[in-house]
Image (spheres, rainbow, N blue to C red):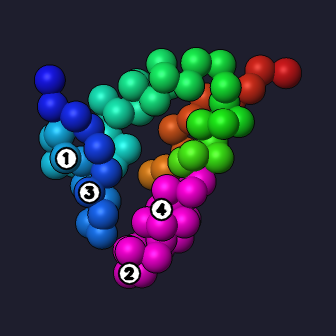
Amino acid sequence: MPEHLPNPPSWTCTGCGREWPCATKQSQLLAEFGGARASLAVYLGSCLVAAAEDLPTVPLPRVRLRFLGWLPRARI
């Protein structure tokens, strides 16, 4: 199976060529981090900062949605 890793500065997936994190990587990250939602958010937040610097022409709200918008929300 190909690894679905980020490929800066374009931030495409090395495994499938889609925007990273692709759907496959999202599933892998959820499994890898388990219930540690905050840790996953911190990791993705650091990726978001790097991607925002590498992709200055992409609007920041779109970058934020791409990196954090797919995360499951906590149930209250």
Describe the element under mark 4 as helix, strand or loop: helix
Q: Which residue is mark 3?
A: 7
Is tag 4's residue or tag 2's residue first in the polypeptide sequence? 2
Q: Quadrant of the C terminus?
A: top right
Describe the element under mark 2 as helix, strand or loop: loop
Magenta residue check for 46: yes
Mark 1 → mark 3, Cα distance in angstroms = 6 Å
Residue drawn where x is 17% and y is 39% of the image = 15
Q: Main secondary structure of the magenta part?
A: helix
| Residue 62 in view | no
Amino acid residing under circle 2: Thr
Q: Give the magenta-colored segment's residue range.
A: 45-65
Is 55 above or below relative to 37?
Answer: below
Q: Which residue is mark 2?
A: 57
- How many other residues sit within 10 Å of disc 4, few (<14), some (14-19) or many (≥20)? some
Percent coordinates x, y for residue 38 in the rendering: 71, 36
Describe the element under mark 3 as helix, strand or loop: strand
Q: As drawn, is 6 to the left or to the right of 69?
A: left
Residue drawn where x is 48% and y is 19% of the image = 31
Residue drawn where x is 30% and y is 29% of the image = 24
| Residue 67 in view | yes
Amino acid residing under circle 3: Asn
Q: Which residue is mark 4?
A: 63
Is tag 2's residue or tag 1's residue first in the polypeptide sequence? 1
Is tag 1's residue or tag 3's residue first in the polypeptide sequence? 3
Q: Are marks 1 and 3 in contact (CB under 8 Å)?
A: yes
Is tag 2's residue or tag 3's residue first in the polypeptide sequence? 3
